[in-house]
Amino acid sequence: MRRIFQYAAPYKGRFYWSVILAIVLAALTPVRPLLIQLTVDRYIAQSLPQMVIYITIIQMGIILIETLMRFAFSFITAWLGQAVVKDIRNAVYKKIIGLNLRQFDRTPIGTLTTRTINDIESINEIFSDGLIPIIADLLSIICVLGYMFWVDWQLTLIALIPFPIMIAATYYFKESINKSFFKVRNAVAALNAYAQEHLSGMNVVQAFAAERNEFNKFKAINKQHRNANINAIFAYSVFFPVIEIVLALSIGLVVWFTAKEALNLQQSQQGVVVSFILCLNLLFRPLRMIDKFNVVQMGIIASDRVFTVLDNEDEEKVPEGGYTVPEDRVKGQIEFKNVSFAYVDEHWVLKDVSFKIEPGQTIAIVGHTGSGKTTIISLINRFYNIQKGTIELDGVDIKKLPRIIYAKT
């Protein structure tokens, strides 16, 4: 999360505004329950219709102000998310086009597509629907609880009795969703990779009449994707009824306790009851939008994948002291000096190979399939970096030459 927010540094002004709006909105949250309590206990009980109208107008004004502020808060957080996504996506694509070709041999193109498009979009939701809105909700909960304890601390403790049930349910829900979403992200990447590879190679599939076989493989991958999503849906289906039951228990305890106190003290408790019921709904509202926590988890999982790409060091390195650029046009002398190369680990395709080709000379490279003919051409063109030895072009190690030399040759 710290690394994600480093990308928000250029837009810290808007980030600070979102935090300020979150604090102000949290402070406004308990105002309406307070005004309603005053209205019921004082103005309705004492039959003061003009004051009821006056308080109602004030509440409408507060609602209007709160609506405008929520609009500004939502717009700023969404704008911030899109700006960060733009920067991260540019950084990822820049990294990908600079990777050595061995990375594309090992990683399906569909997987890299998922990293560049889908996973980065999940990072956007951390800002628009995730972390910042969660902070705003937590501040609102703190303000509402503070108000409830200020009005009646005993009644507040009574209302919070069922909360351990909610905490336990939230913990198990979080664990279940985290595992399910991890499987969902893997399934999405597998689907993208399989579809991209087989659609681009459809001529091969049809040439070998493998349509049925490939379709069955796709159905199996798609089934894994469905099962991962169903597991997440099941967790939702269990969690939300539990939240509603806990809310109902809290409201029931508030009504029971205030009714008991009213009978003992012989005084009205209607305003407190109405106020506390509103406060409990305000407390449980963020929990009904538990998707925000899931969005953060999805964003963290996605960002881990994205940063894995950004941290990949298998890319073209600029040699110390810069590149050696020949003054004249390349003449074309090529020399391999004890070159050894392997695509994977130490499974050598070429081992201690040496030869020299003079400018204008024509030679033939022959050998059985897999002996390294194509590999030699790929190494001359700098598609891969060798593990041992040197390859020289006009007496200069090709590692010291910029790729633009090849484009101009």
Image: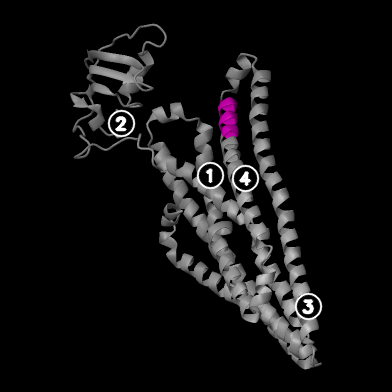
Query: Badges 4 and 2: C-beta atoms under 8 Å apart?
Result: no
User: Is label 3 or label 2 in front?
Assistant: 3
Helix, strand or loop under label 1:
helix
Q: Main secondary structure of the magenta part?
A: helix
Question: Which residue is located at x 49 percent, y 52 percent?
Answer: 85
Q: Relative to 373, say whether 166 is above or below.
A: below
Residue 291 percent across, percent down from the top left:
63, 54
- Numbered circle sitting on residue 408: 2
Q: From the viewer's perspective, is 80 left or right of 148?
A: left
Tell me the amino acid under the disc marked 4: Ser
User: Is label 4 or label 1 in front?
Assistant: 4
Query: Badges 3 and 1: C-beta atoms under 8 Å apart?
Result: no
Measure the alpha-carbon separation of dots 3 and 2.
91 Å
Query: Badges 3 and 4: C-beta atoms under 8 Å apart?
Result: no
Measure the alpha-carbon separation of dots 4 and 1.
20 Å
Q: Which residues are magenta?
A: 190-200
Helix, strand or loop under label 3:
helix
Residue 240 percent across, percent down from the top left:
71, 54
In the rendered structure, which disc, 1 or 2, sits on the residue that comes first in sequence?
A: 1
Q: Relative to 357, say whether 294 is above or below.
A: below
Tell me the amino acid under the disc marked 2: Lys
**Quarter of image, res 149:** bottom right
Name the residue that disc number 1 marks: 119
Query: Badges 1 and 2: C-beta atoms under 8 Å apart?
Result: no
Count residues near mark 2 (Cα–Cα under 10 Å), then give few for <14, some for 14-19, many for 20+: few
